[in-house]
Image: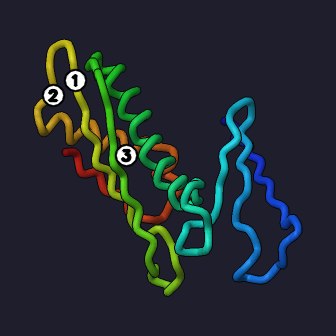
């Protein structure tokens, strides 16, 4: 249905190429979009001021859930005024003993306008539908938990 192209560029530069010393910094290039300074997570010798792949993964899960939620709410004529999430991803060993993001917890806070907020049951159904229809959630193996606050 669609393609999503991303460029990733890395260069060694003048330094040594050993595990302890090679630079983890690289650039993500998006078609007609921004360039993002990326690196490994600090725990893996990366720069904390750069986005790491694990953070980007969690952001993609959160963003996709939000965009799906907004689409569903709009189709139901529910006015969403604001949506914020403080998502957390957990990097730990999976069933095979390999490091993986095994769980992502979403903590959306949503402000509704117009006729007011839906009741708790309706809100839960909106999140269930959003999760079921989220392209990213449908693409990954890890557990994704929605914990509205």
Work out whether residue 103 or residue 12 is closer to the camera in this orientation and state it: 12
Residue 113 horizontal/vertical position (percent)? 21, 17
* Residue 94, above or below 4: below
Residue 136 horizontal/vertical position (percent)? 51, 49
Badge 2: residue crowd in 10 Å (few <14, some 14–19, many ≥20): few
Residue 18 horizontal/vertical position (percent)? 78, 83
Quadrant position of residue 29: top right
Q: Quadrant for the N terminus, please.
A: top right
Name the element at disc 1: strand
Residue drawn at 74 percent across, 35 percent down = 31
Quadrant position of residue 121: top left
Is 29 on the left or on the right of 13, as rendered? left
Q: CA distance from mark 2 to mark 1?
A: 8 Å
The residue singled out by tag 1 in the image is 112
Badge 3: residue crowd in 10 Å (few <14, some 14–19, many ≥20): many
Which numbered disc flags the more N-terminal residue, 2 or 1? 1
């Amino acid at each position: 249905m669609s393609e999503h192209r991303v460029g990733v560029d890395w260069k060694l530069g003048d330094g040594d190429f050993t595990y302890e010393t090679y630079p983890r910094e690289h650039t993500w290039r998006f078609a007609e979009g921004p360039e993002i300074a990326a690196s490994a997570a600090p725990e893996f010798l990366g720069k904390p001021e750069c986005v790491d792949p694990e953070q980007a993964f969690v952001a993609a899960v959160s963003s996709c859930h939000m965009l799906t939620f907004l689409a569903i709410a709009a189709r139901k004529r529910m006015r969403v005024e604001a949506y914020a999430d403080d998502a957390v991803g957990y990097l730990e060993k999976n069933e095979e003993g390999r490091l993986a993001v095994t769980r992502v917890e979403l903590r959306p806070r949503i402000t509704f306008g117009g006729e007011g907020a839906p009741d708790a049951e309706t809100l839960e159904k909106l999140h269930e539908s959003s999760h079921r229809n989220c392209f990213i959630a449908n693409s990954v193996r890890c557990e994704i938990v929605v914990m509205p606050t």
